[in-house]
Image: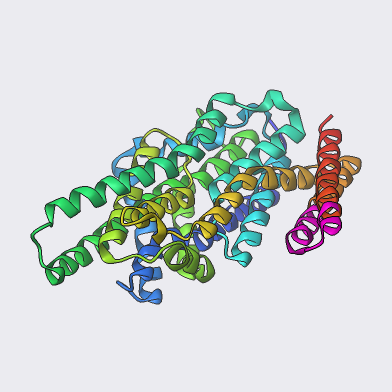
């Protein structure tokens, strides 16, 4: 058990709720991209619509408590709960929030969930080494990174196929009117699933903080006030919206009609409810992106802007390492371990310089210039990896 004064505990809980708020703001696009992209609802109305259903997931969890397994996975299934300290929680939250803000400003629909997972892993390893990791929970989460968008894509294409076959005799006007109503229902279900899965991640963090500091008595469980606070925070965050990400999700990857929007949000909601039931902290961003791509590709592969989709996938790959690195940095800063923190800063700076060199490689026309830029980019990556390795050993 780790001693922590009550004011500091309250401060850390508020930081966690701030992450939950930012999660809702960052992931508003997940809930409403299809309804905004198809102009089923205006942007302001769509944000309010999503915020309502994000919070309504609280009542769903009251009725079926088994849907709250994700909080257990985050709280004790990634890092050994007996090794978690307040500094680990602080580093994890700051690492996740940092990556969320960066991707939000860039309009990149990265995963808030995996940013938090990366933050917990980075801060946990910085504190207690690789022995702190609960590999069963981490492996389940890493597998879901690949499976959630893939299964979402396949499921959406199947829904498109079945509903197209059922409505083969319908008129264009009749089909449009029917799918408008169905799309609204499916979007509400997706927002409900989004609130259910994502709010639990912050619940798990607050609960393990209370457990590690002795403020949670008895077995590991989510207190009622924690659950209510997290659902309120994510609902308010969604109400604030994330317009640049909405544009990427709703219009830039592919153009959607009502049929495609209904299929994408239906496939996504099925995936989210299944993930919540099995306690998998799945990425709502990854899931809906796979569904949107599946909806576009079901008509024709050329309907998907694969260049935009590729950029989104690159963000997925680097989310966990980036947030883990920043989390480790802040853990070492608050723990007074400045040499390790300095190495992480050097790693981040080298990564940034590598990105600049790679951009120069892409725009250079001469062979010598391209070779030099490529060599510099690879060199900075090697330096970054050496700094990270040295900081953890």
363 falls in the magenta region: yes
* Vertical side of 360 occupied by 156: above or below: above
* Residue 377 visible within the image: yes
Left or right? Give the position of 27 relative to 322.
left
Q: How is the image coloured?
A: rainbow
Image side of residue 169 versus residue 331, left or right: left
Looking at the picture, tell me which residue is in the foreground, 156 or 310.
Answer: 310
Q: Would residue 106 appear left or right of 40 to someone viewing this image?
A: right
Relative placement, left or right, of 344 versus 38 is right
The residue range painted magenta reads 352-371
Q: Quadrant of the C terminus?
A: top right
Number of callouts: 0
**Image coordinates for residue 376, horizontal then vertical, percent:** 86, 51
Residue 265: where, in percent of width, then height? 33, 55
Instruction: Say above or below: 200 vs 232.
Output: above
Residue sitting nearer the eye, 308 or 287: 308
Q: Which of the 4 image quadrants contains residue 62?
A: top left
Magenta region, main secondary structure: helix
The stretch drawn in magenta includes residue 6: no
């Amino acid at each position: 058990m780790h001693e922590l004064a009550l004011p500091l505990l309250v401060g850390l809980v508020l930081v966690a709720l701030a992450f939950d708020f930012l999660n809702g703001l960052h992931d508003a696009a997940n809930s409403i991209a299809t309804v905004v992209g198809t102009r089923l609802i205006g942007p302001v109305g769509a944000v309010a619509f999503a915020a309502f259903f994000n919070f309504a997931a609280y009542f769903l969890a009251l009725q079926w408590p088994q849907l709250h397994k994700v909080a257990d996975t985050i709280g004790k299934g990634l890092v050994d709960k007996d090794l978690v300290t307040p500094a680990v929680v602080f580093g994890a939250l700051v690492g996740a929030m940092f990556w969320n803000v960066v991707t939000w400003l860039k309009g990149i629909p990265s995963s808030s969930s995996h940013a938090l997972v990366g933050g917990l892993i980075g801060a946990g390893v910085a504190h207690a080494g690789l022995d702190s990791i609960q590999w069963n929970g981490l492996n389940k989460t890493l597998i879901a990174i690949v499976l959630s968008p893939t299964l979402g894509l396949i499921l959406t294409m199947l829904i498109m196929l079945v509903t197209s076959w059922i409505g083969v005799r319908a008129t264009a006007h009749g089909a449009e009117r029917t799918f408008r109503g169905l799309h609204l229902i499916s979007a509400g279900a997706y927002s409900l699933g989004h609130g259910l899965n994502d709010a639990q991640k912050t619940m798990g963090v607050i609960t393990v903080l209370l457990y590690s500091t002795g403020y949670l008595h008895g077995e590991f469980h989510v207190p009622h006030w924690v659950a209510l606070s997290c659902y309120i925070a994510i609902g308010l965050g969604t109400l604030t919206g994330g317009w640049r990400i909405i544009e990427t999700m709703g219009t830039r990857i592919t153009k959607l009609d009502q049929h495609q929007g209904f299929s994408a949000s239906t496939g996504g909601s099925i995936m989210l409810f299944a993930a919540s039931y099995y306690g998998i902290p799945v990425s709502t961003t990854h899931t809906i992106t796979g569904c949107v791509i599946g909806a576009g590709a079901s008509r024709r592969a050329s309907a998907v802007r694969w260049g935009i989709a590729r950029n989104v996938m690159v963000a997925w790959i680097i989310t966990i390492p980036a947030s883990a690195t920043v989390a480790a940095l802040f853990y070492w800063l608050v723990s007074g371990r400045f040499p390790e923190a300095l190495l992480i800063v050097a790693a981040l700076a080298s990564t940034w310089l590598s990105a600049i060199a790679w951009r120069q490689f892409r725009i250079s026309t001469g062979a010598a210039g391209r070779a030099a830029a490529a060599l510099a980019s690879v060199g900075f990556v090697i330096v970054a990896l050496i700094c990270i390795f040295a900081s953890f050993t």
